[in-house]
Every structure is written in C-alpha cells, then in structure tokens.
Amino acid sequence: MAEPMPAGARGVAAAFRVVPALQAARLDEHRIARLRTRPLPERGPVAVLAGLVVGRVPPGVSVTRHRHGPVPLRVYDPAGSSKRRALVLALHGGGFVLGSARQQDWLHGRLAQDLDAVVVAPDYRLAPEHPFPAAVDDCWTALRWAVDNAHDLGADASRLCLVGESAGANLAAVTCRRAVDEGVPVAHQALLYPPVDLTEGPAATRSYAEHGDAAIGSAAALRWFRDAYLGPDGDPADPRCSPALADVAGLPPTLVLLAGHDPLRDAAASYADALAAAGTRVLVVDHPGMPHGFLGFPGLARDARAAVRAVVADAARALA
C-alpha cells in the first residue's frame, strides 16, 4: 500500500506535471532529440547543481569509457584492489527511449564502492529509432563483453550480478534469463521497480487503478513508452520483452524493489511471487512512499540510499 510521498519526491512529481519535456504525451522526435543531445555535464557549475538532484559518482570510484562494436560502455571501478571483486552489469532506465548510463552515475558508483565491484553500464540503443529487440541484443552483447573481459577489468566473472532500474530492470530480467539458459553463471539480480509485463495484464491490478494518473510513470506514459519500444511489429507477449511470461525456473537469488506510488507495483510483486514459487530466493523491498523512478533523483528521494543499501546487502549475501 502507498504512503504519502515525502516533500522531495512531491517536488519532483510536481515538476513532472508542469514541465513539458518530462511528459511522455508531449514527446515527439524533436523533443526526444533535444533531450538526448543535452547530456548531463561531467564538470562545472551545472554539473554541481545537477549532482544535488541526480547525485554524482562517489569519491574514489573511477569512470572509464569503452566500446564494444556499436555499444558504448561506461565502467565504474572502485579504488584499491581485490582478487574477488564482483562484476555487475547495470542497465539504466528511461522507458527504452531516454536515459543513459551517465544519468545513473550515482547508483552505479555506489554499487561499485559499496559492493566492491566493477560495474559495466552499456548505453544500449534506444527506441523508437531502434525498436525491440535492439536493446535486448545490446544488453546481451554488453554482458558477454563484461564476462570475457572480467580479468582485464579486475573482476571475477564467476561473481556476476545484474542490476536494472525501470526499463533497465526489464532488460536485466530478460538478460538474466538468457544467461541462465546459455550457461553463464549469474550470482544475483536486482530488479528496481521492474516493468515485467508489457501486455495489458498489469492494467487489471489494483496499483494500476490507484496510481494510473501518477505524475511519474502514469498509465498513459507507460503505454507510450511501451508502444515506442515495441514499434509496429513487436509482440508484447514475447518473453524477451515481458519476462513475466517467460520460464522463471532456475533463476538466481533476486531482489525486487517496489515503489508504493508506482502503477506497476502489483505486477512486479506478482513476478516476485512467481520466482519464489519456482524456488528462487527472493527478497522484496517495498518503499510505500516513493514513486516510480525514485533512484533517478537520490538528492530528493528520501529512500534512495536505503534502497541501494538493501541491494548491496542482498547481493553480498548471494556472493558470500
């Protein structure tokens, strides 16, 4: 059940209601292009101000850029050395249309530092120019690159974890399923308010009815992003875009993060139940006062740090 949103999250929700660039209904190819060509600066006064909202890479974590074929990769490496450093594939959110690894610097940097992990974050191709399954293919390519280059990165490929936020959580669940099927060992996955079913199934849930008009992640926005992602030929029932419709047997220990003001909350909770029924160790972490996407603005989201601590603690338990 939802609780009242604290002040910081309410402020972000208010911005989503009045700023045209944040409203999916007003997105067109020109607005999308403008948003993508205005990346967060790495330094300077604007970077400092943005960091107060979206956070920054923690001190002691270095960031390097790589490329594997067409896929740019952002790699986060904590200070010091370790022979058993975990390897994390981190997939950003943004509705399959927006977002970047850079915009999740805070989350990726915290995972690198607190879990003692090398974090590989790809900038997978985005819709609508690159509809499904382009992002799925890019995330798999990134996982294979990370595993194949783990030794050179200073990580242990046998300690592989997947973390995804929003649309990235969908891609993480799909990538984890393929990894298990193809014999790539995955120690843990963390799915942060995941959209696991792109059919109309979630529309029948209570959370969808109660929060369908949410400022962040409204039902209209979710459908717009889904349609942009699938394009004219995509099938929402394809398990590569709706992991809730895939086989859930044999998956690694999983954390599922829920947000109380998220229309997708109940569908994500049902997915967690299905994993547990299939024998997976599942930890469900509920933040009833938070909206969808709250890890994207940790400077204003009261629960962001606690959520990351839960992810790190559960992953560490799986890696022990």
Image (cartoon, rainbow, N blue to C red):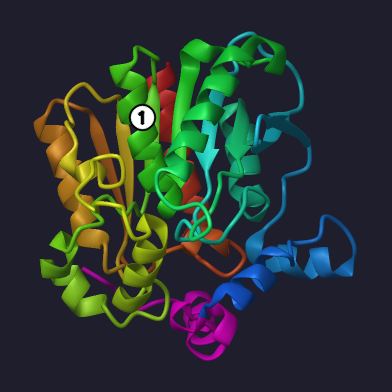
Of residues 128 and 115, the one drawn nearer to the viewer in this rendering: 128
The residue positioned 53% from the left and 49% from the top of the image is: 92
The residue positioned 53% from the left and 58% from the top of the image is: 129
Magenta: predominant secondary structure element? helix
Compared to residue 28, the image places residue 14 above or below, namely: below
Task: Indicate the amino acid at tag 1.
Answer: Cys
The residue positioned farthest toward the front in the image shown: 233
Q: Is residue 184 left or right of residue 128?
A: left
Return the residue at label 1.
Answer: 176
Q: Is residue 153 left or right of residue 261?
A: right
| Boundaries of the magenta span | 1-26
Q: Is residue 140 left or right of residue 264?
A: right
Q: Residue 213 in magenta?
A: no
Measured from the top left, where is residue 277 in percent x and y? 9, 33
Q: Residue 15 in magenta?
A: yes
Of residues 3 and 29, the one drawn nearer to the viewer in this rendering: 29
Measured from the top left, where is residue 134 in percent x and y? 47, 43
Based on the displayed image, in which of its 4 quarters is residue 120 positioned?
top right
Measured from the top left, where is residue 53 in percent x and y? 65, 68
Q: Secondary structure at mark 1?
A: helix
The residue positioned 53% from the left and 28% from the top of the image is: 141
The residue positioned 53% from the left and 38% from the top of the image is: 90
Measured from the top left, where is residue 41 in percent x and y? 81, 60
